[in-house]
Amino acid sequence: MWGADRIRAAEDVLLARTPEGALMRRAAHGVGRYAADLLREHTGGVAGRRVTLLVGAGNNGGDALWAGYELRRGGARVTAVLLAPDRAHPAGLAAFRRVRGRVLTGDSAGAGIGRAPDGDTAGDAVAGAHLVIDGIVGISGRGALRPAAAELVARAEAAGVPILAVDLPSGVDPDTGAVDGPAVTATATVTFGGRKPVHALAPHHCGPVRLVDIGLAPHLPDPDLYQLEAADVAARWPVPGPADDKYTQGVVGIAAGSAVYPGAAVLATGAAVAATSGMVRFAGGAADQVRSRWPEVVAAGSVADTGRVQAWTVGPGIGTGGTGRDVLASVLDAGLPCCLDADAITLIGADPNLADAAYELPAVYTPHDREFARLTGAEVGPDRVGAARAAAAKLRATVLLKGNVTVVAAPDGRALANPAGSSWAATAGSGDVLSGLIGALLAAGLDPWWAAGCAAFVHARAAQIAAGPPPGIPIGASALLAAIPEAIRQTRTP
C-alpha cells in the first residue's frame, strides 16, 4: 500500500505519458463495472435502476461523472448531485449531460439543496436510489465531510442504500484511516493503481476493496505499508522436514502466569504448542496447571530451571510486583529473542534498568493502546502506523500495536497492517494466545517482524474460525486457541 503523496507522484509520471483524459476514463470504467456488479447483486439488474452520484470538485468527482456516463449507457437512471457546481470536472460533466444524466446541485452550506423539474430534491434522489456513488473527495481530501455532503450521506445510510466509494470513503484520512467527524461508510470501494493505507486501516469504512489496474505499478516505489496474505504466512510458517526433530524446529520458553493468573500460563503455552511441531518449555508458579493441560510441555518452577530455549515469551499474568520483575529480569539476562507482553511491558515502562536490558535484544513488544502509553510515554493518536514506527525506532525492536487493525512496525521502518475482519478476538486471554504464537515463531528462527505479522494473521483467522460463519457467536480465548491448527492449515490451502 502506498501513501497519498507516493500515489500522486506516480500518477503525475503516468499522466505525462498518457493522452489527456485516458487515465480517468480507465479508472471510471472500473467504477462503472463494479457499480453494475453491485446493482445486479442487490437488485438483479442495471437497466432502469436508480443511481445517484455525489460529485465533489476535481478528479474524484470526474471519476464519478464518467462512471455515471457508463451506467447511463447501460440503461440506468442516473442523477448527479454537484456539491461544488462551479468546480465540477468539465469533461466528465459534459459527457454526463450528453447521455441525458439528470443534474442537481447542493449549496456549500447544505441548506438549499437543489430541486429537479420533477420536484425531486437531492435528498430524495439519494434516499430513493438503488446505489449511491461517493465521488465527494479523493486522496487529496482531509478532514470530515462538510455539512451538505454529510446530510446526503446520512440520508443514504438511513434509507439503507448501498454506497460505492470512489478510491476511498470520503471523510476518512487516506494515510491513517482516521475519522474525526462525519464520513462515508461504504458498502464497497473501488481504487486505482495501488491500494492506500486507508484500505487496511479503516476496513469498516471501506468494505471490500476492488483494485482497478490503470498502469501505475511500474511507477510506484516500494510500498509504505504491507498487508500479509495467506501465501506470505504459509511460506514462512515452520513445517517439519524429514531431517527435523523437536530441537531443530525451535524450543520456546514461556514465562507466564502466577497463582493469581494461571489461565495466562495455560493459554500462552497452549498457543506455543499449537504453533509449531518443536518443543515448549514453561517456567513459573502455574507449572502444575500447565502440565495438567499440556502434558507434552516440559514445565519448571523458574526460568533458571527451565533448560535451553531459542526464544522466550514473557509477561502474561506474571504480575507487576517484585516476583514478576525477577521473572522478567531472568528472561532478559538470557539474551535471547523475546516476545514482551502484558505485565512485561508495564514493568519495562516503569524500570529503566529493565528497559536497558530489553534494548539489547531482538524483541517484539505487543502493547494495546494503554500499554503503549506506559511504554513510550506518548498516546497512540490517530496515526497508528506512525506511532508504531516511532516506538519501534526508539525501542530498537518490533512493535505490534494491538487493535481491530493490528499494526506491526520494525525498527528499520517496515510496517504492516492486519485487519482482524471481526471483533471476536477482543476477549480476555486473547493477547496471551497471540504472545505464545509469536514466541514459538521467534524460536523457529523467524525475523521478529515476520514472527509478529504471521502470528497476528493466524490469530485473527483463528478467531473467525472459532466464531463460526457470519454473524458468528461470542467466543472465549480457549475457543480461539483450539482453532489455531485449522487457521494454520487454511494458510496452506490454495
Image (cartoon, grey):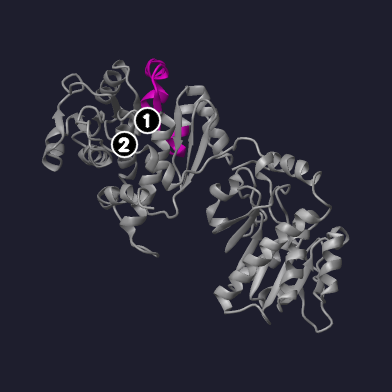
Residue 57 falls left or right of residue 292: right
Q: Quadrant of residue 262?
A: top left
Q: Earlier in the sequence, mark 2 or mark 1?
A: 2
- Mark 1 is on which residue type? Leu
Query: Which residue is drawn at the image coordinates 38% and 19% (left, top)?
Result: 361
| Residue that mark 1 sits on | 446
Q: Residue at x 44, y 50 (%)?
A: 420
Viewer-nearest residue: 260 or 167: 167
2 and 1 marks in contact (CB < 8 Å)? yes
- Three-letter amino acid code of the residue under disc 2: Pro
Neighbourhood count class around disc 1 (C-alpha, 10 Å): few under 14, some 14–19, many 20 upward: some
Magenta span includes 356: yes
Q: Is residue 478 magenta?
A: no
Note whether 181 is above or below 303 in the view shown: below
Residue picked out by circle 2: 238
Secondary structure under tag 1 reads loop
Residue 369 visible in the shown view: yes
Indicate which disc residue 197 carries.
Answer: none
Q: CA distance from mark 2 to mark 1?
A: 9 Å
Magenta: main secondary structure equals: helix
Residue sitting at the far front: 242
Quarter where residue 95 is shown: bottom right
Image coordinates for residue 360, horizontal then vertical, percent: 40, 16
- Across and down, in percent, residue 157 comes to 61, 68
Q: Position of residue 177 (x, y in %)?
A: 59, 47
Front residue (pair 304, 343): 304
Residue 213 vs 4, above or below: the answer is: below
| Residue in the foreground of this view, choosing between 240 and 274 | 240
Residue 474 makes an appearance in the image: no
Quadrant housing residue 341: top left
Q: Residue 394, position in %: x, y? A: 51, 23
Residue extent of the magenta highlight:
346-372
